Amino acid sequence: MTPPDDDDAPAQFASPACLMHEVDPAYMGNAGPALPTPETLARLGGVLLRDIPDAVIFADQGGAIAYWNAGAERIFGFTAAEAVGQSLDIIIPDRLHARHAAGFNRMMATGQATHPPEDILSVPAMTKSGETLSIQFTVAPVTDANGALTGVLAVLRDATATFAELKRLRAALKSRDAR
Ligand code: HEM
């Protein structure tokens, strides 16, 4: 009886993963959707920050505005030059300054939001001309390469028309029920 040659040896799965499989899933014939390259992701990130019609605002650890996109200019009426360096209080009604500051400072101290990330905060906001808007926003902490907190990024949407419509519908329901 001749000893088994290499072809008869049981398959070995303990060898380190072939680098090629990590680099190119198509190599194994199981190509998923093509992943965006880092360059594409960077370009998409730029569009998301600059060009999306929602307001995108970054505030530093002290709560000073450090980034203010064109959407924020359109919604709140302050240009980026006017807003950058100012406190977020320029768009927050006086009666909410303390609650916002408490929430903001807590997040800066702990790195944690009190609301789950999917919670959308609905609050009134002030424009440069003194108009009151209903806005909805989400926030995310931003860290540097060492994991240290550098501020908070927020995406805010003007929901004034939606809230006005809700109010109108509620009033219509109430007067129908009263009949
Ligand atoms: C009109 C604009 C805004 C108003 C009226 C407002 C108001 C508030 C209020 C009332 C809270 C407390 C919520 C709670 O305790 O349940 C809060 C929390 C917070 N706000 Fe603002 N805010 C505004 C804009 C912003 C912006 C632009 C940022 C960031 C760039 C921001 C960052 C935060 C953070 C990080 C919290 C804590 C959230 C959490 O812990 O889950 N806010 N804000």
Image (cartoon, grey):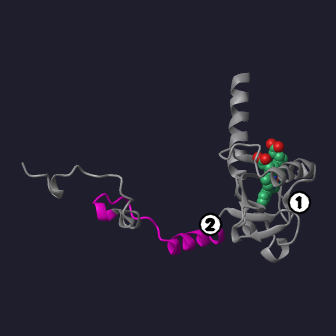
Residue toward you, 64 or 110: 110
Depicted 68 relative to depicted 138: above or below: below
Depicted 28 relative to depicted 175: above or below: below
Closer to the chain start, of discs 2 and 1, is 2
Q: Is mark 2 on a helix, strand or loop?
A: loop
Question: Is residue 25 among what the camera can see?
Answer: yes
Which residue occupies 69% across, 51% down? 161
> If the image is split into quadrants, where does the C terminus sit?
top right
Q: Is residue 125 left or right of residue 51?
A: right
Q: What residue type is labelled 2?
A: Ile
First to last magenta residue range:
26-51
Which residue is label 2 attached to? 52
Which residue occupies 61% across, 72% down? 46
User: Measured from the top left, where is residue 28 in percent x and y?
Assistant: 29, 60
Q: Is residue 90 left or right of residue 40?
A: right
User: Measured from the top left, where is residue 3 in percent x and y?
Assistant: 13, 52
Residue 71, picture quadrant: bottom right
Question: Is residue 123 among what the camera can see?
Answer: no
45 magenta-colored:
yes
Q: What residue type is labelled 1?
A: Asp
Question: How far is mark 2 from mark 1, CA to CA?
Answer: 23 Å
Neighbourhood count class around disc 2 (C-alpha, 10 Å): few under 14, some 14–19, many 20 upward: some
Q: What element carries label 1?
A: helix
Q: Can you name the residue that lies furthest to the front here? A: 1
Q: Is residue 118 left or right of residue 22?
A: right
Q: Is the magenta stretch mostly helix, strand or loop?
A: helix
Depicted 67 relative to depicted 93: above or below: below
User: Measured from the top left, where is residue 58 in percent x and y?
Assistant: 76, 65
Which residue is label 1 attached to? 89
